[in-house]
Image: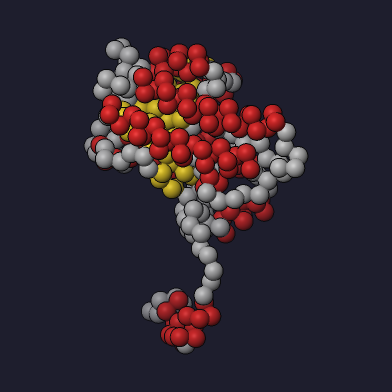
Amino acid sequence: MSDANDLAGKHALVTGGGTGIGFGIACELLRQGCVVTIVGHIQEQIDAARKRISEELPGAELRVALGDVTVEEDMRAAVAAAADADGRLDIAVANAGSAAPGPILLLNKADWEYCNALNITGTALTIKHAAHAMKRGGGSIVTISSAAARQVEKWMAPYSATKAAVEMLTRAAAVELAPFGIRVNCISPGLILTEGTRNLPEELLQECREDTLLSDLGQPIEIARGVVYLSGASGRWVTGSVLDIGGGMHVDAGEDFQGVARARYGAEFDAALGPESE
């Protein structure tokens, strides 16, 4: 978490803020005292998010902007709506993204263009227009990638490829925007339980738990806390970084040398790995 409410009064923009991870990020920034603008392209989702926040966080300073992150004019307008009276923005979270599951042998051009436009171009436009509103006083931009950016997930090639691009885009932006005092970082989540992922087949969810070192799936608040850290005083010397928040899902455990280790230590091996004696 940030130092003693150091985000209070800051102006923040969260794309894809009507549902899932984006909604969780928006709520946590509101709890920190930020003036938050959520951006989404589906009116019903934006309205539902506004209603829920008004009930759960009365008095929070929430703004909404209906727009498509892949449309330049929409992002220019969204940033203007999120900025303070002087046109300054302090925090931007490029969260909007999606996938087009399917085998490479069947995916069509539209599937690739959809993921490219939303995950890469949408993130790039968010960075561009947020940075223009931060040039005079610096700020924090946080992008959202995925564990899939570095681990092959079968039948998810467009998602993995475009999320990997998000991580490189983040580093490129960090280099270019550093002279303006703008920090650009990325959070790479593991599997987070949201409205969408809760509907995945239970066997897939269980497989993800087993692939996660801490044997559990995440909640949006986990990612939101990462955003608070990267955007507050505690993260003031962090830029161009990718922060893995996935309970250990990002760790490639490699081969298991249990047999070799047991041969060396004998009974001590099993004793050491067993439950602590009373």
Determine which quarter of the picture holds residue 272: bottom left
Q: Say which residue appears at 49% left-offset and 40% top-offset.
A: 145
The picture places residue 177, in percent across and down from the top left corner, at 33, 29
* 217 up-or-down from 180: above or below: below
The furthest residue to the right: 106
Q: Say which residue appears at 52% left-offset and 41% top-offset.
A: 164
Q: Is residue 238 left or right of residue 256?
A: left
Q: Is residue 40 left or right of residue 176?
A: right
Determine which quarter of the picture holds residue 127: top left
The picture places residue 49, in percent across and down from the top left corner, at 51, 25
Decide if residue 61 is in sight here: no
Determine which quarter of the picture holds residue 116: top right
Total tally of numbered discs in the picture: 0
Decide if residue 216 is in sight here: yes
Q: Nearer the viewer, residue 264 or 117?
A: 117
Chosen colour scheme: secondary structure
Point out the image quarter for the C terminus. Answer: bottom left
Q: Nearer the viewer, residue 107 or 236?
A: 107
Point out the image quarter for the N terminus. Answer: top left
Q: Say which residue appears at 49% left-offset and 53% top-offset.
A: 250
Q: Nearer the viewer, residue 171 or 61?
A: 171
Q: Say which residue appears at 73% left-offset and 33% top-offset.
A: 108
The picture places residue 207, in percent across and down from the top left corner, at 62, 56
The picture places residue 9, in percent across and down from the top left corner, at 28, 24
